[in-house]
């Protein structure tokens, strides 16, 4: 992974990994603050009491490349169909293309 860089150098055309002012990591996108209309790397989350916490990003890194192939132990999905009980479907997880 890359070194942490100042948030001012972050590209605004894709999602990135950021560090918030309290040291927590988040995936973020450049967006407009719904409260002020200001554009920034804004991180909004809630605490365990439901209070809204607004943090500013201080540093960033590019997101790592996704895995070439995703494997799963769950090969069966159960879907509850209306009026007919449950139905079992067997499927393979999709391949992820970079």
Image (spheres, rainbow, N blue to C red):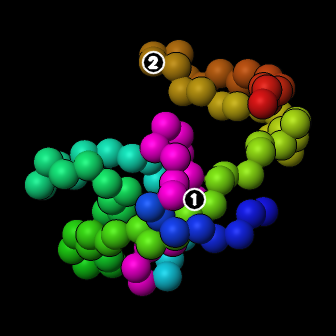
**Residue most toward the left?**
36
Q: Position of residue 78 (x, y in %)?
A: 66, 31
Quadrant (top left/top right/bottom left/bottom right) for the C terminus: top right
* Residue in the foreground of this view, choosing between 48 and 19: 19
Question: What is the span of residues highlighted in magenta in the rendered image?
Answer: 9-22
Q: CA distance from mark 1 to mark 2?
A: 41 Å
* Residue in the foreground of this view, choosing between 88 and 11: 11
Q: Which mark is residue 64?
A: none
Q: Secondary structure at mark 2?
A: loop
Question: On the rendered structure, is 17 left or right of 56?
Answer: right
Q: Residue at x 57, y 59 (%)?
A: 17
Residue 50, compared with residue 72, is above or below; it is below
Question: On the rendered structure, is 77 left or right of 6?
Answer: right
Residue count near mark 1 (Cα–Cα under 10 Å), binned few <14, some 14–19, many ≥20:
some
Q: Residue at x 56, y 52 (%)?
A: 16
Residue count near mark 2 (Cα–Cα under 10 Å), binned few <14, some 14–19, many ≥20:
few
Q: Nearer the viewer, mark 1 or mark 2?
A: 1
Residue 55, compared with residue 73, is above or below; it is below
Q: Residue at x 45, y 18 (%)?
A: 82
Question: On the rendered structure, is 72 left or right of 85?
Answer: right
Question: On the rendered structure, is 49 left or right of 97?
Answer: left
* Residue in the foreground of this view, choosing between 88 and 62: 62
Q: Is residue 16 magenta?
A: yes
Q: Is residue 21 magenta?
A: yes
Quadrant (top left/top right/bottom left/bottom right) for the N terminus: bottom right
Q: Which mark is residue 17?
A: 1
Residue 14, compared with residue 76, is above or below; it is below
Counting residues from the start of the chain, the first of labels 1 and 2 encountered is 1
Q: Secondary structure at mark 1?
A: strand
Q: Are marks 1 and 2 in contact (CB under 8 Å)?
A: no
The residue beneath circle 2 is: 82
Q: Residue at x 59, y 68 (%)?
A: 5
């Amino acid at each position: 992974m890359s070194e942490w860089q100042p948030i001012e150098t972050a590209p605004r055309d894709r999602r990135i990994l950021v560090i918030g002012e309290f040291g927590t990591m988040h995936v973020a996108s450049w967006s407009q603050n719904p409260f002020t209309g200001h554009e920034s790397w804004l991180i909004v989350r809630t605490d365990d009491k439901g209070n809204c916490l607004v943090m500013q990003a201080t540093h960033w890194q590019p997101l790592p490349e996704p895995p070439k192939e995703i494997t799963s132990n769950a090969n069966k999905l159960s879907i509850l169909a209306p009026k007919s009980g449950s139905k079992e479907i067997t499927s393979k997880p999709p391949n992820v293309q970079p």
